[in-house]
């Protein structure tokens, strides 16, 4: 089956910048999205259109096509430490740590630039903002999206999504 609008797609990826690997899903569950519903960057989605299981695709995205340019003015914010969540660890916050914070736009990754006793100053730019990124993608599965997935606009893990 070829990837077309409303296809449920799973893939593994390796993300790099200037030939340096930044992250990979190789030892994790594959990423999934519903094609044509904004689940991945538009340029990436266009590169995956018409591909099939076991195809390998490499796509390079400019900052404008991915996380945007870095913005310096007004993008440092003081946040109470209790609102910051470091993925998978209970260790103390350190300068340079990438943490999650809930905002009115949902969960957002920020970078800690200064740590105090009760608050941390955080850079609100996405950690990958301003970078030209290359995704090496291997397509793992392609199927038709279910009616429920199409109505919700995203893939459901086993057991549904709770909507």
Image (tube, helix red, strand yellow):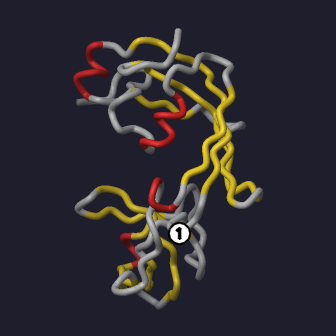
Most foreground residue, 78 or 60: 60
Which residue is at 65% across, 49% downward?
A: 15
Which quadrant of the rendered structure holds the C terminus? top left
Q: Residue 135 appears in which quarter of the rendering?
A: top right
117 with respect to 153 (left or right): right
Up the image or down, 138 lies above or below 59; here it is above
Furthest residue to the top? 1
16 with respect to 131 (left or right): right
Residue where numbered disc 1 is placed = 130
Q: Residue 10 appears in which quarter of the rendering?
A: top right
Most foreground residue, 33 or 52: 52
* Badge 1 element: loop
Up the image or down, 14 lies above or below 48; here it is below
Up the image or down, 55 lies above or below 14; here it is above
11 with respect to 160 (left or right): right
Q: Position of residue 141 (x, y in %)?
A: 57, 18
Which residue is at 37% across, 21% downward?
A: 5
Most foreground residue, 124 or 48: 48
Classify mark 1: residues with Cα within 10 Å, few (<14), some (14-19) or many (20+): some
């Amino acid at each position: 089956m070829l990837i077309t609008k409303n296809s449920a797609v799973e893939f593994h990826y390796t993300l790099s910048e200037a030939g340096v690997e930044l992250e990979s899903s190789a030892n994790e569950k594959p990423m999934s999205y519903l094609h044509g519903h904004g689940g991945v960057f538009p340029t990436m989605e266009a590169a995956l259109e018409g591909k099939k299981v076991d195809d390998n695709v490499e796509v390079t995205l400019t900052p404008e096509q991915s996380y945007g340019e870095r913005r310096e003015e007004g993008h440092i914010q003081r946040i109470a430490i209790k609102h910051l969540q470091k993925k998978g660890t209970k260790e103390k916050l350190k300068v340079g740590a990438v943490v999650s914070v809930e905002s009115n736009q949902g969960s957002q990754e920020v970078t800690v630039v200064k740590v105090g006793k009760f608050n941390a100053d955080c850079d609100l730019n996405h950690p990958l903002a301003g970078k030209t990124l290359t995704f090496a993608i291997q397509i793992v599965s392609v199927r038709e999206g279910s009616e429920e997935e199409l109505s919700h606009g995203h893939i459901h893990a086993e057991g549904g999504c709770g909507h």
